[in-house]
Amino acid sequence: QVQLVESGGGLVQPGESLRLSCAASGSISYIYTMGWYRQAPGKQRELVATITRERSTNYVDSVKGRFTISRDNAWNTVYLQMNSLKPEDTAVYYCQATITTIARITTDYWGQGTQVTVSS
């Protein structure tokens, strides 16, 4: 069993910052790419940022220069530092990780989601 647990969402005003965290736990042998996705009301889920185990990163154009993804391999944790938040960043943010379990099965896992609301 593998679980991804997110934390750090909330309500902020435009221009403020938030930091999301996602910790993976369970029968983990190896974690490949980790990432953050988001889904706004009435819209499809979209990729926000990804990071490989070697810390190569990728961002959607709308967050470049404002968001930073990082990870701690020792603690199986991925972070998303979000600065200069805009109302259009409002969404449920989901953590995702590609994980090989101790049983040598590789699967994509998802967290339960955390709400980020940017509003004045």
Image: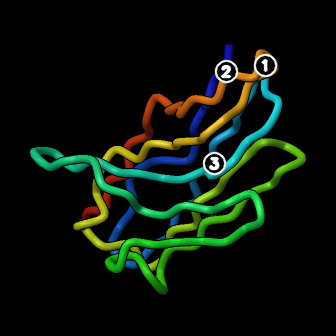
Depth check: give the residue in front, 83 or 24.
24
Question: Tag 3: residue type?
Answer: Ser
Q: Which residue is label 2 attached to?
A: 2
- Judge whether residue 108 can be spotted in this image: yes
Q: Residues within 10 Å of mark 2 (few under 14, many from 20)?
A: some
Q: Residue furthest right?
A: 74
Rendered image: mark on residue 42: none
* Whether label 1 touches label 2, CB < 8 Å: yes
Which residue is found at the position 77% from the left and 15% from the top?
103
Q: Residues within 10 Å of mark 3 (few under 14, many from 20)?
A: many
**Mark 2–mark 3 distance (CA, rounded to whole Å):** 16 Å
Depth check: give the residue in front, 99 or 7.
99
Which residue is found at the position 60% from the left and 71% from the top?
57
**Which callout, 1 or 3, points at the residue further toward the start of the chain?**
3
Q: Which residue is label 1 attached to?
A: 27
Residue 102, horizontal then vertical, whole percent: 81, 20
Which residue is found at the position 73% from the left and 46% from the top?
77
Query: From the viewer's perspective, is residue 117 above or below residue 65?
Result: above
Rendered image: mark on residue 21: 3
Residue 51, horizontal then vertical, whole percent: 62, 62
Q: Using residue 104 as the reference point, say whether residue 94 is left or right of it.
A: left
Q: For residue 90, what is the image quadrant?
A: bottom left
Question: Tag 2: residue type?
Answer: Val
